[in-house]
Structures are given as C-alpha cells and as structure tokens.
Amino acid sequence: MARRPSWHRLAGRHDRGPVSPLTGDGPAGLPIVTSVAGDMVEYRLQRQGHRTIVVFHGGHMRAGLALGEEVFTSAGFTVLTPSRPGYGRTPLTPATSVAQFTDTIAHLCRLQGVDKVAAVVGVSAGGRTALTMAARHPDLVERVILQSAVGFDPWPGQWARLGGRIIFSAGVEAATWAALRTLLRLAPGTGLRLLMRELSVIPARQVVGGLSPEARAGLTELFRAMRSGRGFIADMDPVPDCAAAVTQPVLIIASRRDRSVPFTHAQSLATALPHAQLEESHADSHLIWFDADYPRTSARIGAFLTDRLDGQG
C-alpha cells in the first residue's frame, strides 16, 4: 500500500522556531534560523538515516511547510529543507543571488557533517536553485530531482508576471493571503477552484472534482498556510542558465496539464541537461503530490535514488 504524501504543515503559528548561533535541530520539528558564514538562513532538519536530501521548495513555501517529503523520509533519508531568500526568515537583500544562496547551503551541509548529498530536489520555482547548487558543487551533490520545476526559459508569462507583481508585492501579499484564507474557510470549494484556474490547463471544476476528500483537505490546509514574503517577486527574475554544467543524473517530473509551469520547461531542461531523464506525470495540475497518479511518481523517485551511479558498485 502506497504511503500518503506529506503535505502537512510541520511548524506552529508563523513558524517561529528559535534563532540559534550554531547549526542543529530545532525542537519538535520547528525550523530554526542560524548564521552560516555570515548569512542568516532558516531551515528545518528532519533526521532519519545517514544519507541526506536537500529540498528547495517553490513559490509561497518556506521551511515550516512540508510537501512531498515523505517519499524521502519513508526511505530512511534525512531531509534538510531551507527557506529560500525572501521566504520565511531567510532574508532577501539586494546582494542576494541564487548562486550565493546555494554556496551558503553547501556550507550548511558540511557544518551538519554532510559531505555527500544524495539528491537536491527543486520544486517549482526552486528548480533553478537545485540546478545551480548541483552545478556549483558537483563534489557534494550526487543527483538532482526536479518536480514541476521552472527551467531557464522565461517565466512566468507576461500577464502572470504583471499580476504577480501587484498581488504578491511586499505591501500587498499579506492581505492577498488573508483574503484567500477567508475564502477557503467560508467556501473551500470555490476557493480551490479559483486557485486551480492558475495551476491547470483543464477546467478547475474538473480538477477539484477529481481530488479525493483527503487531497482536498490537505490542499486547503497547504494554501491556508502559504505566504509570499519578498520571495515570489524575486522568483520572477531570471537566473543564469547553468544547465550545461550539471553533470549529475537528473530526474525531471512534469505534467502536460500544468498551467503554472508549462511542460516546455521540462522539455527544454531535458534537452539541455547532459544526463537527464524526463518522467511525465499524469497529474491534472501543477500540484502532482495531490493527484491519484502520485504513487507511480513516488515509485519512480525511489527507483532513481537507488540507481547505481557511474563508477559505483
């Protein structure tokens, strides 16, 4: 029997874990904030086994939220989940770059005693961060897994970019999410259909109607916990294309029904990355973890993680 995907919120209200001068585990699964080589980073560390997965979440997500991590923890991997710059309590400054952030996370890994990362996982807008870390730290990163990931093609589209810069700007995003939380509380079906319009190319009513009651409840909970901070506006900026420099095996998982990140991103990455495998999800939307097809996808992830690397027995 397939395990249910983890999409629940792990932290308490506002994810207010401790600020620590040293790296370590936060109490009761709470994310912590620490200084790594002078840079402040919020992260959550869920210890399981001796091999580690680093997860870079996508837009509107932070370390205090979990999405699709159970496929790794159930297989015995430790999971390190940082908040990307502008999300949670990881600051975004004018000098912050994706490259600099991945260097910080590589340093954080080594402070935790991790000299090999079994895989970096890039979810949605976190895809470019995962690829950048793999390109810059090939001695540390063994594999890459991309899930509904933004590539290096222009993203998002013109109208989505204009709208996003308005409703998710620093002075407005709190009110945007407060309004969405109210709608999801008073009329959850209407709220889910409104949000799914931007996440699927098929009618939102059909997408929501196809969800199990458990998936609807989990998806509603996830949306109600999201915030954009300053991170989502930064996510719309271009990132230097490093695909040709990624020498590790890469598993790309994407759905043709994804409106948020068009399937062409996955196809472009599959062409540009030297050692990529493209696995097409049959999910009805961007949110592959809530779809009935996800057990097949999670099995593919498990197989990819156990594939023999070149030069290993």
Image: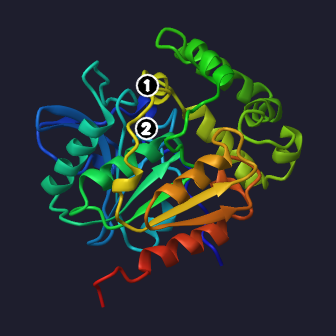
Indicate left or right for 71 with 186 as reference: left
Question: Residue lying farthest top?
Answer: 171
In front here: 78 or 135? 135
Q: Residues within 10 Å of mark 2 (few under 14, many from 20)?
A: many
For the C terminus, the image quarter is bottom left
Q: Quadrant of the rendered structure where residue 219 is?
A: top right
Of the two numbered discs 1 and 2 in the rendering, the one whose residue sits closer to the viewer: 1
Q: Quadrant of the rendered structure where residue 312 is?
A: bottom left
Residue displayed at 21% across by 32% down: 40
Question: Residue lying farthest bottom?
Answer: 313
Is residue 134 in sight in this rendering?
A: yes
As drawn, the label of residue 234 is: 1
Q: Residues within 10 Å of mark 1 (few under 14, many from 20)?
A: some
As drawn, the label of residue 62 is: 2
Q: Secondary structure at mark 1?
A: helix
Check disc 2 and give the amino acid type: Arg
Residue 157 lies, in percent from the top left, at 64, 28
Residue 34 lies, in percent from the top left, at 19, 37
Residue 256 lies, in percent from the top left, at 73, 52
Q: Secondary structure at mark 2?
A: loop
Number of marks in the rendered image: 2
